Amino acid sequence: MKATVLRAPGDIVVEDVPDPRIELPTDAVVRVTAACICGSDLWPYRGVAERPGPVRIGHEFVGVVEEVGNDVRGLSVGSFVIAPFTISDGTCPLCVRGVHTSCLSRGNWGTPGATGTSDAGQGEAVRVPLAAGTLVPVPEAPDPAQLPDLLTLSDVMGTGHHAALVAGVRPGSSVVVVGDGAVGLCAVLAARRLGAEQVVVMSRHASRQAIARTFGASEVVEERGEEGIARIKDLFGGIGPDAVLECVGTKESMQQAVGSVRPGGMIGYVGAPYGAELPIRQLFGDNIGVRGGVAPVRSYIPELLTEVLSGDLRPGAVFDSTLPLEDVAQGYAAMDAREAVKVLLVPGGAA
Amino acid sequence: MKATVLRAPGDIVVEDVPDPRIELPTDAVVRVTAACICGSDLWPYRGVAERPGPVRIGHEFVGVVEEVGNDVRGLSVGSFVIAPFTISDGTCPLCVRGVHTSCLSRGNWGTPGATGTSDAGQGEAVRVPLAAGTLVPVPEAPDPAQLPDLLTLSDVMGTGHHAALVAGVRPGSSVVVVGDGAVGLCAVLAARRLGAEQVVVMSRHASRQAIARTFGASEVVEERGEEGIARIKDLFGGIGPDAVLECVGTKESMQQAVGSVRPGGMIGYVGAPYGAELPIRQLFGDNIGVRGGVAPVRSYIPELLTEVLSGDLRPGAVFDSTLPLEDVAQGYAAMDAREAVKVLLVPGGAA
């Protein structure tokens, strides 16, 4: 089959790779209907996160079960499934507590682990370890128009939801979102879904601002640094919002978050930390809480899926570009240049 | 009047100082019935926190209102009052949100501020700025036997409660308390009060262990460092407790907290950070939240006071030493040597 391989920073191609097959009785093989490129895929693409030699890449996909191992319950050949961005057994004490990303049998797509090396998501098919725990079946074959919405449940919608949830967003909350990538935009949607009264997004890109407004942002702040903090304080009664959702992970974005939130408020952070620091004395002095991390999206899919299927939740607008899998390099280049928010990839060519 | 003055690190005395008087119409003068020494007073006493020249010290006291300014509502001459460890107006947007420690008119005992320099707590009397916002009157003159319980509401009981509250402790929670000072012991009591099922305290001192057990600790761990972490993981199903209450503030105590809590859990921290750091990548990877800070005890006093007056809440056992005010130096020396958990000071000499 064909799959994406990152040969070296900046050098990404679609190559012939071995077809996936059942290796363990807990495996399934899924034929990929749609996959996508994540902002976090750009870290190894840019060489910021080092990878040893060529690696398979991609951790978001939806597809159809093609084969199941003998021990897989709850999935049948032909089931349409959503794959969250980590592999988990669904039964360990941490999965039971909803922290699937710290599953005692945790695995990552395309990476060696206790259950062998799975395929990664940006390819035609995937061997899925711990399939019964990892995959979430969709009750009926979905309307193709809903594919983008469903695909966001693999990562970005669940991650935005995580930021809002751990920051304690609830009816009436005032919220600022730092970051206008797909996760930041989904965080806007998630905060509004949880009842936030006022959601302000920090963004300098007109097209992203437009999506944010569609998702429920009431205001956009273009300023950054001290000027951005002053503008935010001003918008929220001089004290700042109840919650800031930090969806970037850099030193500057975290400083923006810490400087903006009101005393006693919460920062929900989901941007993988590349440079971000937590200034304990400042946090302590003003009772600013920080909570977040690698989002356990597996635990959120059932709840969010119901609303996606009913049409009440439409996060799919974060995909502003769709490409055939073979044009994956073009997709990475577009996201790297911030010309695309998020690129959807269709194996088989029909875009 | 007589009051305590820290002349230089290690050099603490009771001196004659000017009598307090009403300087602003929002002031009250309170005759101190009982005061005490805080673990955080040891930082300047040891010279770890620098202070310029001689300073008045002490931020915990209860007493009787002797005089009120013209604008003070809700307090009368003769009222018995509890003073929380910061001065706040009770009306600003942050007080309204319960974050009195970040009050827009915040002041600290014995320190210059917008409302002048108040007296500090370890003395015979105190000028209290913003008295209506700061002080909490007790409905009736309390039974002298309840003085220690009431005095804990100035700081340590409210601070322990803050740690447990922001860590999300609720019925059924599993909790570890790092620190066996008065705050750590109160955190044990607070966690049990909020319904924690299992509370383990880390302590190496038999007398403190005994108080912790009285307060509801089910287990004591004496090991520290990696060994302590392993012991805690072992006690909580291999994964660690839902919440760790960090009541020390050093690098080692925070490492203990971060290493012990389960993935997805919370650290409530109230130990003033002297060396403590927040390792963002470790916190992010396992979704460990951190929340805490200078406890807004003013907001907790009404609720806790009701239970103290009814006798349901008895935190006063943290005082294992009572001294006349003039023996304050002896009290500091005993706490510095960890020979006393917490020292209660009685002006006027009758101990």
Image (cartoon, coloured by chain):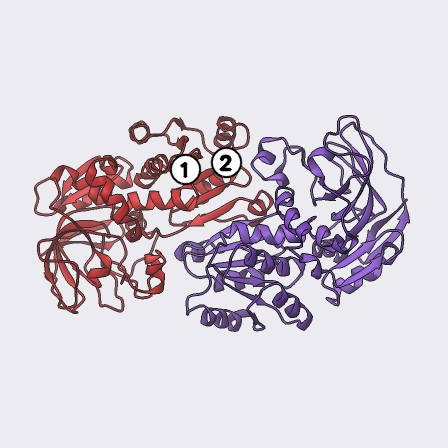
Chain colours: A purple, B red
Judging by the rendered image, the residue that carries numbered circle 2 is B260
Describe residue B223's horizontal placement relative to residue B125 as left or right.
right
Describe residue A209's horizontal placement relative to residue B62 as left or right.
right
Along the line of sight, which residue is nearer the eye, A279 or B340? A279
In contact (CB < 8 Å): disc 1 and disc 2:
yes
Residue A130 is at least partly visible in this image: no
Along the line of sight, which residue is nearer the eye, B201 or B304? B304
Whether residue B122 is situated above or below residue B194 in the rendered picture: below
Comes first in the chain, label 1 or label 2: 1
Identity, as a three-letter code, of the amino acid under mark 2: Ser
**In what quadrant of the picture does the N terminus of chain A appear?**
top right
> Are discs 1 and 2 both within one chain?
yes
Neighbor class of circle 2 (other Cα within 10 Å; few <14, some 14-19, many 20+) is many
Identity, as a three-letter code, of the amino acid under mark 1: Val
x then y, percent, for residue B243: 46, 39
Snapshot quadrant of residue B193: top left
x then y, percent, for residue A170: 48, 54
x then y, percent, for residue A17: 89, 43
Neighbor class of circle 1 (other Cα within 10 Å; few <14, some 14-19, many 20+) is many
Task: Give how far apart the Cα atoms at labels 1 and 2 are.
Answer: 10 Å
Snapshot quadrant of residue A332: bottom right
Q: Residue at x 41, y 38 (%)?
A: B170
x then y, percent, for residue A351: 85, 58
Judging by the rendered image, the residue that carries numbered circle 1 is B178
Q: Residue at x 22, y 35 (%)?
A: B320
